Image (cartoon, helix red, strand yellow):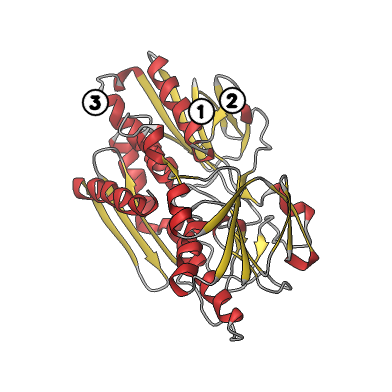
Amino acid sequence: MKKVSIVGSGFAALTAIKTLRKSSMDLEITVISPKAEFHYLPGTIWIPCDLRKPADLAIPLNNFFQRMNVRHVSAKVSGLKNNGRTLETTEGDIDNDALIICSGGQFIKKLPGIENAITPCEGIDATVSIRDKLKSMTGGSIAFGFSGNPEEPSAMRGGPMFEFLFGIDCQLRKEGRRDQFNLVFFTPSENPGQRLGPKAVSGLLKEMKKRNIETHLGHKMKQFTDHSVITEGGEFDAELIIFMPGMTGNSWFNNTQLPRSKGGMIKANSHCQVEGFDKVYVAGDSGSFPGPGWMPKQAHMADLQAETAAKNLLNEFDNQPATHTFKIELLCIIDSRNSGMLVLRNEKLNLILPRMRLFHWLKRFFEWFYLRQYK
């Protein structure tokens, strides 16, 4: 029986498992991650406004793994050897006949004073901290911002920041406290949201102006303090800083011979194969893939890449060439607690549908529909 190791238990990893099992039960699948638990990070935008609780978004995977006949090893990966055939972990070496790396990325935290900011996509606990801080504040300034990896255009996650910005604005208005707060959006880019498309940029900026949200755009960041954001264009107050840095590869990649992009990700081709390695694939935030600069780091893209990786791996086990490629597509609803804007971008189309209540409920329905398969 062929042994397949999958690193991670996020979107890409779970999609890879489902794709493999659709075609073959005759595989020994081992998943390596710290916990047998899936954190649905898109839903964390609703934790600060109490539409979601942490338990709603942390999904135990024991039942899913049992149904899929998957062995889970609670461990952290520390390295790779034998040309990809042996994973080094905190629970010992794990051998495989094929490997799919879905371990995500890590945020670049080199900016002085970064410890004074909360990075929401680091996990559920981070958004709980935002919620608790908001509840304790009686007024003041809140800064929302993001940056990228200058060596990896796709290695940024700006979309959630717009959702936290608009969602918290909406929540403060609902509580009758908005006039006690000053909200500031900042980023080194002069045109935030460019990956969503030109129409989205103008739409987002108009929405900020409509909500009386200040902007501080086009200035390189220098430092955070416990009460301010400092950029090359000036300093402004912030009692709460919510900031999404650019992304790079996991630290355990440094203990491997895996090929790396300039931005620190694992280099892959359009089939999700890792260059120079036999039956080693990558999907999601861990990888650097060929494609346009707007290609997103988001759950939808991770799912598409994981499905491609699993299908090509099955081809190789059948002594067939890897022929499957993934669709490059950005699909999201930018939510603001009670409404949302739909954005679709692929290589042929860039569609922006204006803010509607329907899209908020559609996003909530999709969350329920997506998570039910893992419960």
Residue to which mark 2 is pinned: 116
Which quadrant of the structure image shows residue 210?
A: top left
Residue 213 in the figure: left or right of residue 116: left
Where is residue 39 shown, x and y percent of the image? 46, 43
Would you place residue 41 above or below residue 25 in this image?
above
Residue located 43% across and 50% down the image: 63
In the image, residue 24 lies at what x, y percent?
49, 73
Where disc 2 sits, the SS reads helix
User: Disc 3 or 2, which lies upstream in sequence?
Assistant: 2
Q: Secondary structure at mark 3?
A: helix
Q: Secondary structure at mark 1?
A: strand
Residue at (43% x, 71% y) in the render: 22
Residue type at tag 2: Asn
Can residue 192 be seen in this snapshot? Answer: no
Q: Residue 216 at x, y = what percent?
A: 48, 36
Q: Residues within 10 Å of mark 3 (few under 14, many from 20)?
A: few
Going by the numbered disc 1, the residue's amino acid type is Ile
Contact between marks 2 and 1 (CB within 8 A): the answer is: yes
Determine which residue is flagged by label 1: 241
Spatial CA span between label 3 and label 2: 27 Å
Q: Which mark is residue 209?
A: none
- Seen from the viewer's position, the closer of residues 52 and 99 is 99
28 left or right of 49 in image: right
- Give the side of residue 179 with respect to residue 196, left or right: left
Residue 73, percent from left and from top: 62, 49
Rounded to the nearest angstrom, the CA distance separating label 2 from label 1 is 7 Å
Name the residue tied to disc 3.
174
Which callout, 2 or 1, points at the residue further toward the start of the chain? Answer: 2
